[in-house]
Image (tube, helix red, strand yellow):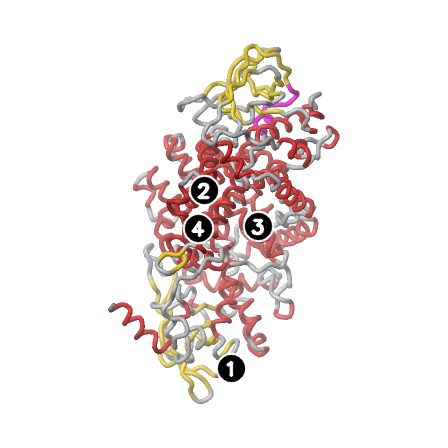
Amino acid sequence: MDLNDTPEQAAYRQQVRAWLEEHKAEAPVLEGPDALPEDEVVPARRAWQRKLAEAGLAGATWPKEYGGQGLGPIEQVIISQEIGRAGVPGILDVIGVGMLGPTIIAHGTEEQKSRYLGPMLHGDEVWCQLFSEPAAGSDLAGIQTRAKRDDGGFRLTGQKVWTTNAQFSAYGLILARTDADVPKHKGLTMFVLPMDAEGVTVRGLRQISGEAEFNEVFLDDVQLDDDMVVGGVGNGWGTALTTLMFERVTIGFGSEGMGYRPQRFADAIASDEAASRDGEVRQRLGHVATELLAVRFTSYRMLSALQQGQIPGPEAGLSKITTVNAAIAGCDLVADAIGPDALREDVDNPIGYHTSFLPGLKSAGGTEEILRNTIGERVLGLPPEPRLDKGIPFSELRAKEKEAAAR
Amino acid sequence: MNLELSDEQIFLRDAAKDALSRTNTVEAARATLDGGERPDLWPTAVEAGWTGLLVSEEHGGAGLGAFDAMLVMQEVGRRIAGIELLGHLPASALLDAAGHESVQEVAAGTRRAAFVGAQPPGDLDDGWTVDAVNGMVRAPAPAFDGSVVTGEAAWVVDAPGADLFVVVALQDGAPVAVVVEDAQVEEAVRYDPTRRLGHVRFDGAAGTALAVDAAQIERAWYLAQALLAAESVGAVETCLQMAVQYAKERFTFGRPIGSYQAVKHGLVEIMRRGENAKSLLYYAGWAYESGQDEFPLAASAARSAGGDALDYAARENIAVHGGIGATWEHDAPLFFRRAQLSRRLLGGAGAATDRVAGEVLRGGDPGGAQADQRAAAAATAVDA
């Protein structure tokens, strides 16, 4: 077995590397003493995304007709690796280019494709994903945001949450309920939402770390025209599944993408001579490293399957489970070995930051429990649990749930 | 990048599945436990050409790679077949590397070799050591004075009945691989009768040193770790299959038990651990051929993950089956026995985990740049 590039891949890598070498001085600096002031980061990263797009290094897997390169997943990975190697930031709008753009390509009208895809790819218009709600995450089809028919369009009212990048997005892809009198998966519709529309309010949501990485988005009687519907009225669930499939591809590349490499934890332990010679510490570190290495090679297996034209199944979620738990165990180990000093929340101590970040990541992109259910049912073929909501109109569901709770 | 199996590899795997299916190896494991004879599967290995799998073509072997050997070992593990490849294959690789006169016969399987390996020095254990009969303290590797070997090694895999031994011994403190025919082997069946184990003693046994260096000797140790990992991965898959099947058929409170989250999540955990270990077999297979500096890390990680996965799978399989899964007549305990013993052999799974830690503490995981460089390419690998 040989993990080296084929001649074609090596040539492509060389080409990417040469471009980055030539242009990396133009990339925004995000860390260290020369870091940009916070208010300049987003504009600078948008400009950088434009340069990457013009060089063919953003949306490489998109079809050529929509501004992509029509390349395969391997080339996409080569780009990510070379960007990492050059030490420059990647594109700003990973969610748009990685998940929402491909959804529009799959389900959008020709007008939508020509209007939205170009500016998305070039970072001129950043996008956000408006799916989860305070009362609907794992059970996404249970969303309550209503889109009511109105003259020539719809009026949306409700609340979304965990919306990354909403504070500077131009558009969002939003899942809303257009018909409450049919079972919950059937009455959903996907829309394009201009984030500057009247009635849209974005509020930062601070997390354990104190940072606001996500937002809450409130919708108060927001007017949308018919041409904002993506994939047809009542087909929102199918459209959402496409987005979630692309999300799995992103998440499947797991620890590497998230930066959880064994070395991160090993270096922290190696800084302490006694810890690095302690048998128990070494056992724990060995387990963490083993799990993270396994994720790396699982992602290579997945990449091979993608390259052969296979669609990633829900088992890709196993990598997310492994990565998050191994990273939690790694942070825990470092703090146990080093003591309170390991919990410093400085920029130069990533362990402190990740200790705060990881508990939330456990639920991001599907909670561990829901991922295990899905894999158990779809991959292992195990029977589902009995459920209350099968075939019941959404409008009657709340009453049923209350009845069950009172029993 | 292409980690899909090549046509040749698929053929090798399917042929192994087929050849091993001719004996009911699981039933044989129970019969052996009941005092019956273990079936002799060596002729199967010979006929299939597995005995010379890692021997180069010029020496009469198939000239295949470690990953190919791991494919066969997965099938062996899947059926907990008692077949003496774990001892033979690392020995054959050293004999091949040195071009020893016995290599043709060893490749052909007319002579069966056993590897009396020694664990290379680690951060906490600085010598070349072998497994002791009992206790936490490891024993020093046997000694070689240039002509004879003296010393002993316990729990040597596939030692009983071996025609020759490739012994890792110390000569002036440096490791040498010595071919010995004259050893005293005390058969030591323990817990899992599908394994032939022996305490091996050399009383000034005549031996000839192989023309291999310390790096090659170390490589043979980690090859054994990787093969054991592969065997465990195969057994995990059988446990998962058994448990899933039962979880679909067994009803409680009017529902199949596999519909309960507690059961379902446990089954997915078997899969998660098994798939992780399987992914690390690819790492070990690649490193053996092309990234030798990383082979100790890769093989140790595979061993650690494989051992843990099988331990979990074997227990969970029993638990999902309920009381019946813990009875003598059931197959689940046979896999449990396999899991229990496997974790303690060849230095033990804990030592493998420690080695992983040692490697990453030294910065031995290229993780960043190098791994990234190769990532994209992993896939064409097999065919290329």
Q: Position of residue B362 (x, y in %)?
A: 48, 34
Tell me the magenta residue range.
Answer: B210-220
Kind of residue at disc 2:
His
How far apart are the two marked residues, 2 and 3, measured between alpha carbons? 35 Å
How crowded is the residue under tag 1: few (<14 C-alpha within 10 Å), some, or many (20+)? Answer: some
How crowded is the residue under tag 3: few (<14 C-alpha within 10 Å), some, or many (20+)? Answer: many
Q: Chain of mark 2?
A: B
Residue hosting label 4: B267
Q: Are marks 1 and 4 on the same chain?
A: no
Kind of residue at disc 4:
Leu
Q: Nearer the viewer, residue B287 or B367?
A: B287
Rendered-image quadrant of the N terminus of chain A: top right
Q: Position of residue A25 (x, y in %)?
A: 55, 54
Q: In which quadrant of the rendered view does residue A116 lie?
A: bottom right
Kind of residue at disc 1:
Asp
Please give the label number shown on residue A301: 3
- Is A93 contained in the magenta span? no
Q: Chain of mark 4?
A: B
Q: Is B277 placed above or below B171 here?
A: below
How far apart are the two marked residues, 2 and 4, measured between alpha carbons? 19 Å
Q: What residue is drawn where x is 34% and y is 68%? A: A135
Q: Is B326 placed above or below B97 here?
A: below
Quick one: SS at disc 4? helix
Is the C-beta separation of discs 1 and 2 under 8 Å? no
